[in-house]
Image (spheres, coloured by chain):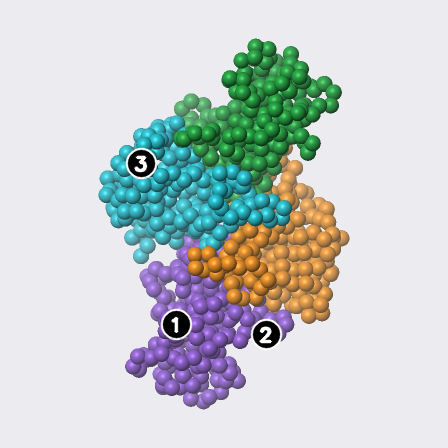
Chain colours: A cyan, B green, C purple, D orange
């Protein structure tokens, strides 16, 4: 019943992402990036995407391919102008892409709020900085805090280490990063993994992302794909 | 560092600043190291001191760099460098990592600074102008860690000041820096203001005050900043 | 159930109500079963339908009761009963369990009810007076699940009504019940009001309306409520 | 350096809990209750405790022992009047103990907020019910929501399955329940476990509660202690 979650290819898994979708894209540095799914998305017609991800690309691979093809309307990220994000920088300076920068932890927590049904939350992060401009602030227990809202996606495109055929996921090392929280915050979560096993192989206590958060699983076609650093 | 020849000749090198910061970390502290000079701090902390290094991309117990060829693509730090793990390490995702940071469970965040104010305001994520820098985890770490140790050269290359009455660059967080380590001084932020604890060998209180906008508190002659013993 | 002899003789037993609820669950649904009759529902759902049972004390993929002597103290459901796990089960703590519930990831919460209002308000955690009941996970489940299936006897033992214009007991959540299964009727809550879908064999629309405060919508004769085939 | 987290006995581990402390107490039903620590606390002089826990006791064991000795001033819980909580009920009806009941998920999330540095949050749970009385409400995205605040403890008294000597924890089955979130929300977390292993035995990916949340670990003296059901 649930092994219909396993898709035959990255291309099949992303085939119906619509124009204008908000994509939650996992990855931090070179770790935990769903590179095969990104390659498939680059071949795919969807445009005007909003991409929520930690950083605005990493060299010429992954997100940069989508950027080069003009598929991305807006990036919401925590770190925009890393030297490795030169593809984004060029588009940005030409006025061809919108940018919203968020504190990394606030971004993670806003995504969590979307997945966890929290309607809004107050955080001390960013108070008195540009990150709080235009946002409601108040003082709670003597501390100035700012109101932040959920940040959901239409589709989460993430990377895990291992999945079972029901969609339970495990991550490895620091390749988890934004992937587990993003899995909770979109009605359609598409996961690239290195290995797919039978249900029951992953012990209940070892599951990092429970199956109900995952709609599609694909074994990455080229597991040697790596972003340059 | 500044073009003042006296300051320049006495200024500590990055490794010496990192060594001084390392000495300041309390034994057993949980520490986050930012990008740049802060990443060097780990090199000068003996394992026996029980200091644990946490990175905001989801690890506690990060160990030294792997040997060449031993890198694991799934194990990196927040500076995107390959890492090893020490026994007792744990890994987790960003939501949990920043719950830890925001929740006050990190004792010390060691962060590079662009400017620091008299009140301990920190500016370190961007400079005015388009297309520079990024926020990253800096705002969360600055607001969430129990203490912030800031590291910077004391002045800009053109001699412009960086320890100011008020920061002129966009802020990272207000009133968070507890200790500032520069290439010529170690300054602690007290309720009364910045207190000059140590100055680089060969320099005087007046030399440091001359390149600091806020008045520096002192209590007799400050100590000498450590310098590499075998240069 | 009521003291009305006709209603009483036609009323479904708890197992029959559970069976009717089980039939209503969509294949593949993620379902939370509350305490009482709802716990019976699992007995009537074939494994092949892909329904997954989630319990708010931290499990997805709870299986049938263990054989006697096979109980594991660390595996229980929210009714504190020992459970087994099915392949593909996962476990987690309360914070994550309720993130799932509040976040709308549970398709259906099947809950016992004390009263249900015309608008689908649910009262099921306490009755007026001191020292009764508890909230438990009911408010979170009622507010968070995409649909709430409520189960109750249609009236109190003394004949008092439970399907009311407005609940008189303390509320669990407002406007959340989508389907109500009683011992004499299956009622769906539509934007226009409660719609009588099925009545127990031997009863009429009028019989059910007589013990329901809100006007029940109908569209021709309702279907018959299922009853155990081999009594 | 960190194996000083391992305490020789439950009694030693709880010896300095002060009068008036707020205790976050793990456990749900009969699973994941730190019974040895509770027995030790019963022998201990601390009084006027506020106990935050899912339910108001379970038979004559565990929390009930503290209750019988009059050590508990107030219970904050999600389910007060279960038939198994008869010790609490008696005290409550005699006016000898205060009670605050919270929705179970709101309780878990308030404890998480305390651990995660969230100053307050809006949730739809409990709107229009007694649980929202006296609390700020507002409408966010068309939904009525209520403002909830963090619920920290002075001491978390919890149960895990396994610890390493540095304090990393794993839980088993549904015995995790409130234990992991409570571990994050008190400056002093005391953990009873069934087994203590050397650092490194628990793989980084298998750790459920990272070591920094744990201050004291003790192997439960009587692992056959069980609450009646």
Using a 10 Å C-alpha cutoff, classify the residue at mark 1 as few (fewer than 14 neighbours), some (14 to 19) or many (20 or more): many
Measured along the vertical axis of the image, is residue B150 above or below residue D43?
A: above
Q: Which mark is residue C189?
A: 1
What is the spatial separation of the Cα atoms under label 2 and label 1, in whole angstroms?
26 Å
Give the x, y percent position of residue D221. 65, 49
Q: Name the residue that disc number 2 marks.
A: C128
Of residues C131 and D90, the one nearer the viewer is C131
The answer to the question of whether label 1 and label 3 lie on touching residues, with beta carbons closer than 8 A, is no
Of residues B124 and B163, the one nearer the viewer is B163
Pick whichever of labels 2 and 1 is earlier in the sequence. Answer: 2
Which quarter of the figure is the N terminus of chain D placed in?
top right
Q: Residue at horizontal 40%, vertical 81%?
A: C215
**Same chain, marks 2 and 1?**
yes
Which quarter of the figure is the C terminus of chain D placed in?
bottom right
**In the displayed structure image, the side of residue A39 where residue B56 appears, left or right:** right
Q: Nearer the viewer, mark 1 or mark 3?
A: 3
Give the x, y percent position of residue D7. 67, 42
All told, the count of numbered labels is 3
Give the x, y percent position of residue A61. 31, 32
* Residue lying farthest to the bottom in this orientation: C5
**Same chain, marks 2 and 3?**
no
Chain letter of the residue carrying label 1:
C
Chain letter of the residue carrying label 3:
A
The answer to the question of whether label 2 and label 1 lie on touching residues, with beta carbons closer than 8 A, is no
Q: Which mark is residue A96?
A: 3
Chain letter of the residue carrying label 2:
C
């Amino acid at each position: 019943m649930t092994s219909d979650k396993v898709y035959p290819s990255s291309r099949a898994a992303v085939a119906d992402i619509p124009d204008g979708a908000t994509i939650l894209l996992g990855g931090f540095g070179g770790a935990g990036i769903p590179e095969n799914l990104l390659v498939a998305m680059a071949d795919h017609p969807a445009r005007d995407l909003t991409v929520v991800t930690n950083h605005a690309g990493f060299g010429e691979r992954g997100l940069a391919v989508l950027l080069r093809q003009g598929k991305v309307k807006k990036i919401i990220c925590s770190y925009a102008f890393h030297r490795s994000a030169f593809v984004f920088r060029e588009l940005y300076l030409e006025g061809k892409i919108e940018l919203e920068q968020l504190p990394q932890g606030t971004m993670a927590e806003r995504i969590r709020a979307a997945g966890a049904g929290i309607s809004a939350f107050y955080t001390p992060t960013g108070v008195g900085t540009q990150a709080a401009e235009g946002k409601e602030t108040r003082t709670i227990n003597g501390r100035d805090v700012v109101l932040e809202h959920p940040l959901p996606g239409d589709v989460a495109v993430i990377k895990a280490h291992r999945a079972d055929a029901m969609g339970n996921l495990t991550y490895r090392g620091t390749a988890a990063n934004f992937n587990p929280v993003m899995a909770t915050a979109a009605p359609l979560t598409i996961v690239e993994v290195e290995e797919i096993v039978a249900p029951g192989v992953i012990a209940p206590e070892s599951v990092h992302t429970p199956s109900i958060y995952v709609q599609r699983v694909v074994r990455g076609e080229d597991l040697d794909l790596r972003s340059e650093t | 560092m500044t073009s003042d020849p006296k300051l320049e000749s006495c200024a500590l090198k990055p490794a010496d600043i990192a060594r001084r910061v390392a000495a300041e970390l309390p034994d057993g502290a949980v520490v986050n190291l930012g990008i740049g000079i802060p990443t060097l701090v780990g090199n000068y902390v003996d394992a026996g001191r029980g200091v644990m290094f946490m990175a905001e991309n989801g690890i506690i117990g990060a160990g030294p760099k792997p040997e060449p060829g031993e890198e694991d693509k799934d194990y990196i730090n927040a500076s995107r460098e390959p890492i090893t793990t020490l026994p007792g390490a744990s890994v987790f995702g960003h939501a949990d990592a920043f719950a830890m940071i925001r929740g006050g469970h990190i004792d010390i965040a060691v962060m590079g600074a662009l400017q620091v104010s008299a009140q301990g305001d920190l500016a370190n994520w961007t400079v005015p102008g388009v297309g520079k820098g990024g926020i990253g985890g800096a705002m969360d770490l600055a607001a969430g860690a129990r203490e912030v140790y800031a590291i910077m050269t004391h002045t800009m290359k053109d001699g412009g000041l960086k320890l100011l009455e008020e920061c002129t660059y966009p802020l990272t967080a207000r009133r968070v820096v507890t200790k500032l380590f520069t290439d010529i001084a170690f300054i602690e932020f007290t309720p009364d203001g910045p207190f000059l604890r140590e100055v680089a060998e060969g320099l005087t209180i007046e030399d440091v005050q001359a390149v600091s906008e806020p008045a520096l508190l002192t209590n007799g002659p400050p100590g000498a900043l450590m310098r590499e013993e075998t240069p």
